[in-house]
Image: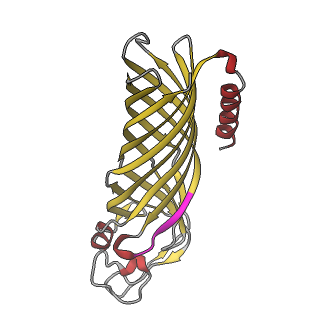
Amino acid sequence: MKYACFTLSVAAVALFATPAMAQDWYAGGSVSYVDQSDSDNSGTTGAFTTGNLGDGTTLDVAAGTPYGWNTEFDNGTGFSAEVGARYGNGFRSGVEVSFTSVDVETHSGVTLGGGSIDALDAASIAGSPTPLGATVADVVADGRGDLSSTSLFANVYYDFNRAGTVQPYAGAGIGFSDVDVKYNPSGVGVIDDGETKFAYQVKAGLTWLVTDTWEVYGEYAYRATEDIEVNNDLFPGTLDIENQQNLFSIGARYRFG
């Protein structure tokens, strides 16, 4: 995170401290369709004793035991705003603020100690002394929850066909994302935590010059962070959650000249 903050600070100073280099300035915003990739969640437990395994017995779990499951997400939405400068050599740079949010669709494939526990009674992970009458797989299949990110990026772009009305472009950015994660399948609180992580993105798009000052654009971006480490509220342990997104955006920019 310190590296990302330092890099963003340098990029922001470079952007705003060199107005003589800028051909023109712009501000823009976009809305996005967000395709959140599945997460192969993995972590280790603290020491704890399970609830009823369904047959009247319990199990002592040692600290450091690996566990995990897979999470699938629904498609979500995003919003972003950017201010930047355009240069005479085809390059431009910008500082972007973005927010994205997706809901959990389902969880599956719960493992503990390297083996599946899908068939066990859910009392085993809920800490209940009596069976609940539903398996672990049944409980986690009811997704519920969400993953949201507030991000800040320093971006660099190159615009092609600058003399034309339609201008393809490519870009990339680095920054950081403050990611909040909630997993509460079947109303059972499992994860409610978050972390700020280094983030990066690559972009490609098309700009259409509508007037001398207004332009609209369509854009694809791949965005990712380092794994998000969160605490488990259901039993002692931490969990690493993967965070990769594909964003399809439409937006508009205003050129200040």
Which quarter of the rendering shows the N terminus? top right
Q: How many numbered marks appear? A: 0
Picture quadrant where residue 113 is located: bottom left
Q: Residue at x 40, y 36 (%)?
A: 251
- State the residue at coordinates (38%, 31%): 219
Question: What colouring does the structure picture have?
Answer: secondary structure
Please say whether residue 66 is one of the residues in the magenta stretch.
Answer: no
Q: Is residue 55 left or right of residue 239?
A: left
What x and y, as percent, mark residue 233? 51, 72
User: Image quarter for residue 142?
Assistant: bottom left
Asked if residue 165 is positioned above or below residue 119 in the image, the reply reads above
Residue range of the region highlighted in magenta in the rendering? 188-194
Residue at (58%, 55%) from the top-left corner?
Answer: 195
Q: 98 or 191: nearer the eye?
A: 98
Is residue 190 within the magenta segment?
Answer: yes
Query: Which image quarter is the C terminus in?
Result: top right
Residue 206: which quarter of the image? top left
153 or 62, which is in the foreground? 153
Question: Residue 63: where, in percent of width, then height?
Answer: 56, 67
Residue 132 in the image: above or below residue 114: below
Q: What x and y, as percent, mark residue 199?
A: 54, 40
The percent position of residue 116, horizontal first and vertical second, equals 33, 64
Could you say which is closer to the camera, residue 170 or residue 255? 255
Q: Residue at x 44, y 82 (%)?
A: 127
Does residue 177 sit above or below 46 in this rendering?
A: above
